[in-house]
Amino acid sequence: MSDTELNQFAEKFCQDIIAGSRDTDAEAFSEEQFTNLMMEYLADAGEIDDREICTHQARGIKVNGYAFFNDNENLDLFVSHYTGECPPVRVAKGDLQQQLKRLRTFFDRAIRRDYANLEESSPAFDLADRIYQLRNRLTHVRLFVLTDGIAGIDAIEDEECGSYRISSHVWDMQRLHRLVSSENRLEPIEIDLASDFGKPLLCLPMPEENPVYTSYLCIMPADILADLYGKFGPRLLERNVRAYLQMRGNVNKGIRDTVLNQPHMFLAYNNGISATAESVELVDTDSGVPGIRRIRDFQIVNGGQTTASIYHTRTKDKKDVSGVYVQVKLTVLKNPEDIDYIVPKISECANSQNKINTADFTSNDPFHVTLQKLSRQMWAPAKRGSQLETRWYYERARGQYQDDKARKITPKQRRVFGEQNPTGQRFTKTDLAKFEQSWDQLPHIVSLGAEKNYRDFIIQYRERGEFVPDAEYFRLLIAQAILFRRTDKIVHGLKYGGYKANIVTYTVALLSKLTDQRINLERIWKEQRLSPALENAITALSRIVQAHITTPPGGKNITEWCKKEECWESLLKENVSLPDALKSELVDKETIRARDARTRCRTEETGTSGTDQANEAATGHGPALLGESIDYEQFIRKLTPQKWLKIIRDAAGTESFSHEDIALLRRMQKMSGRGMKPKKEQVLQAKTILQVLAESGRKDGVES
């Protein structure tokens, strides 16, 4: 790596920090922007699972961010040493050790409940209190020091502190540049079986040579698998944290029960795991069977449930798993360029226990590729008082914006690029998910964090029915982006003192709910701004939201309270009304129906608006309404996820149905997306809801 390449990368990184500060009107918080950007890079690469910004500094303590994961058994804590220098300067070992000491002190005080001096309504108090509440559950704490300089420190030994294993990690510009320049692949996991576990892993190589790969069959003790998962966490399970979603559900109860009650039968009952590696080192053993001494870039691409179940059974249930063995198929790929093609195919094809939909929803998915193409082609209308049309730049892959700008040869070309593609109009995949999920009234999911929210967005996208974006979808998406980002700036200006991200998503969701999504997005796109009435409504609603989320029942942790659906549902029970000025701006239901990109996609494919009278009636299209002549059972079982979504929206827009009714409809939608058959009683309940909805439609038709 040359100094020139590093300096160029650092310059782009610095420009991103400046742009981020400018976008949020927060020039004074460059360290916070640095922390957020650094953690975004690490999350993109799968080095960390997710992150929350939490900036606090006092005498002897400092923290900039955190993340709980692995069922709250693991904790990542982040502290930043931001210099603001470019090219990057060398940071002394003592300075980095001092930052780690401050971070460690924050953790130690939280464990001892020594944080009474923190403001109770602050995110830092929330974090310290959360650590204390989970003190008996935590097993592994990772301390990260992040710096925009060049670290004068190498590896730091892990330490055992009571029941906690504490590891320290330093990420500087050099290490981050290596990660990014290697196409965002994880730093390879190196395992020395002989050194770490006392002996090599016996294996049976495939009988014939193959130019693409070599496979080995092994039987691995469960203790080794659990130790590896405890050390490397999600990095062990996923080449890309966004590419594979096997671990989205709870720990598999059947696997756990076998480990607890019939450990000697585990090998017979379980299908084992499939893993890949870049290379292995073989040795001869006394038994005459080859043994694997070292493995480089070990990745489990199928068997996440098995791995996590064994780990949780050992740590949570305190079960000795020494008598449990797991079958391992280890595939060593001979050509590095085959990794991105072959590994997803192994993951897709290998699983026979639980059906896995192809989950390679990466930046190369047609959804993202098409959205990027639209963002480069479509010009947004000029804002009032300006003649300059601009683009909303979709950054499909990290760093695209700065790379595109850097390719402009002259200073004038770079200036024009910046004017036509303002940094404030750049957005990423996780931004997209926040816009969509807030508008779809899922603020508790958005509050889980950028990565978890993005994963849920992927699941929602598939269960509702995939589609390729069109120009109309792009315009509506940008309108949502303007709504979300303007809400962010309004909330920032009100200086509530914390929980801004939660207040913003809850405010947008509440606005969406109270208006039945009838906000004039089409007008927002045309004017590239919000109306005064809409901004006034946002200000008023944000005050209600802030008061609600910061007074959780029973003194609950505010951050965790915001992640609960109960928080959202209880907000909806409050007596909140819309200002009359905003009501007069709302669009009609026909406009809402015309927004559905999935319907437009199907219409273009078939050349018709639909011939099934019953389906049209149920989803608000066509004049016919469901009547007694309809075979409800057959009709309900044939409904697609996108049609269920329309029914849910129609039902939620009336006052005729309870939360339980809406929850049933959502379950039916999910079952439809997963190919599951509903139970008889669920069909009967759904039939009743549809009949009431149809009758409501008749009355509306008569009244209109």
Image (tube, rainbow, N blue to C red):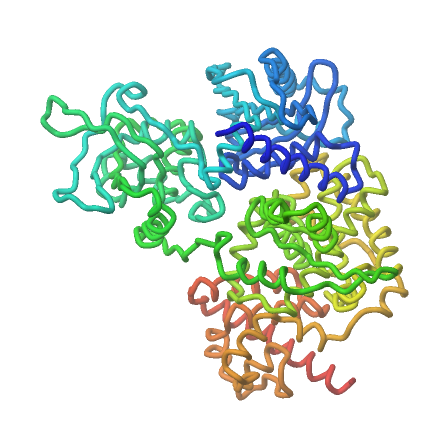
Q: Is residue 604 above or below residue 345?
A: below
Q: Is residue 387 left or right of residue 223?
A: right
The residue at 53%/87% (across/down) is 611
Whether residue 132 is visible: no
Q: Nearer the viewer, residue 498 or 407?
A: 407
Picture coordinates of residue 189, whole percent (x, y): 38, 31
Q: Nearer the viewer, residue 182 or 140?
A: 182
Instruction: Residue 207: name its quadrant.
Output: top left
The residue positioned farthest toward the top in the image shown: 94
Picture coordinates of residue 648, whole percent (x, y): 62, 67
Q: Is residue 523 above or below residue 30?
A: below
Q: Is residue 371 left or right of residue 361?
A: right
Count of numbered badges drawn on the protein: 0
The residue at 69%/52% (across/down) is 417
Quarter the C terminus occupies? bottom right
Q: Is residue 609 above or below residue 319?
A: below
Q: Is residue 315 left or right of residue 335?
A: right
Q: Nearer the viewer, residue 682 or 38?
A: 38
The residue at 72%/75% (across/down) is 591
Picture coordinates of residue 78, whole percent (x, y): 61, 27
Picture coordinates of residue 277, whole percent (x, y): 31, 37
The residue at 64%/21% (across/down) is 110
Whether residue 241 is visible: yes
